[in-house]
Each structure stands twice: as structure tokens, then as C-alpha cells.
Image: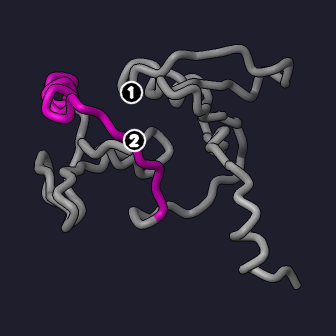
């Protein structure tokens, strides 16, 4: 068993590289990540065609993997993105009739976390929850 205090003292300088999610319809999911979230599609590193890669502004990637089996979805397990244009994004979602809600589940509304950050939640075509907030790291 690893001594946690020893691991904390090493400071491995981790940065996020990517998240990989399984999707049932690769084309529908790719359209969502491009057209709703505005992510840039990038080459998939030579992997098979059932895997597509997308990139955020900070170069962190999201890998979509077409699969017949998908995990169960719940709001507490989500990806979170931040933007300094939350209201503009909400207006865009409204213009596209794309449902979003706050943490309690009220449609079209934000909520504010105790740290002052406003947030909304939406789901991709496979039901994965995505938080979008106005925080900054």
C-alpha cells in the first residue's frame, strides 16, 4: 500500500489530458460537441474510426468512443466546463431549443454555488451531464 503523505510530497505536476466517454451514436455525439459546445475536432491519433477526439481551449481533450454498452448516468457524475460568457451560452442554448437546468432541476435557470460561481447543467445525446459555470481556475 502506498504511503499517501509520501505521494503528496512528490508533487507530480499533473495536468488534465482527456476524458473518454462511450457513446451510442458517434455522429450525433460529434455534432453535439461541435455545434452545441463549439469544440474543435482534432485527429484521433491513428485510432479506429469509431473513436473521435475533440479539444477544449486549454488543449484538454474529450474522446468519444462508439460502443453498444453505456454506463448509467447521474447528475452528480459530470464533466464541468467554465466560461466567462455563461449568459451568452444560455442565450445560445435557448435559441437552439436545447434544454438546460440548474442543480435542483429547474429548466432554464442557473444556481449559485456557495463560492459565488453560477452554474447550469445540460445533457449530451447519450445523457452524460455537463456542468457549465462562470468560474475561473
Q: Residue at x 62, y 40 (%)?
A: 24
Q: Which residue is farthest front?
A: 9
* Numbered circle sitting on residue 54: none
Q: Residues within 10 Å of mark 1 (few under 14, many from 20)?
A: some
Q: Is residue 104 above or below residue 29?
A: below
Q: Residue at x 72, y 14 (%)?
A: 43
User: Would you name the residue on which mark 2 appears?
Assistant: 81
Q: Quadrant of the C terminus?
A: top left
In this orientation, which residue lies closer to the viewer: 116 or 32? Answer: 116
User: Would you name the residue on which mark 1 appears?
Assistant: 37
In this orientation, which residue lies closer to the viewer: 62 or 31? Answer: 62
17 to the left or right of 120 = right
Q: Is residue 91 in the magenta section?
A: yes
Are the residues at dot 2 and dot 1 in contact (C-beta closer than 8 Å)?
yes
Hey, which quadrant is residue 98 in on the image? Answer: top left
Q: Residue at x 42, y 66 (%)?
A: 76
Mark 2 to mark 1 CA distance (whole Å): 10 Å
- What sort of colour scheme is used for the picture? one colour
Total number of numbered labels?
2
What residue span does the magenta drawing correspond to? 77-97
Marked residue nearer the N-terminal end (2 or 1): 1
Residue 117 percent across, percent down from the top left = 21, 53
Q: Residues within 10 Å of mark 2 (few under 14, many from 20)?
A: some
Q: Residue at x 17, y 33 (%)?
A: 90
Give the structural element (helix, strand or loop) at label 2: strand
Q: Is residue 96 in the magenta section?
A: yes
Mark closer to the observer (2, 1): 2
Q: Is residue 135 above or below residue 112?
A: above
Amino acid at each position: 500500500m502506498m504511503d499517501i503523505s509520501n505521494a503528496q510530497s512528490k508533487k507530480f505536476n499533473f495536468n488534465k489530458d482527456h476524458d473518454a466517454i462511450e457513446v451510442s451514436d458517434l455522429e450525433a455525439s460529434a455534432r453535439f460537441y461541435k455545434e452545441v459546445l463549439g469544440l474543435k475536432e482534432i485527429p484521433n491519433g491513428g485510432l479506429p474510426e469509431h473513436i473521435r477526439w475533440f479539444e477544449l481551449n486549454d488543449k484538454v481533450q474529450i474522446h468519444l468512443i462508439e460502443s453498444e454498452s453505456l454506463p448509467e448516468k447521474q447528475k452528480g457524475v459530470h464533466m464541468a466546463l467554465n466560461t466567462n460568457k455563461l449568459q451568452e451560452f444560455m442565450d445560445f442554448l435557448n435559441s437552439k431549443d436545447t434544454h438546460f437546468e440548474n442543480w435542483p432541476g429547474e429548466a432554464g435557470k442557473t444556481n449559485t454555488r456557495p463560492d459565488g460561481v453560477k452554474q447550469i447543467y445540460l445533457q449530451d445525446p447519450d445523457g452524460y451531464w455537463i456542468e457549465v459555470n462562470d468560474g475561473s481556475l
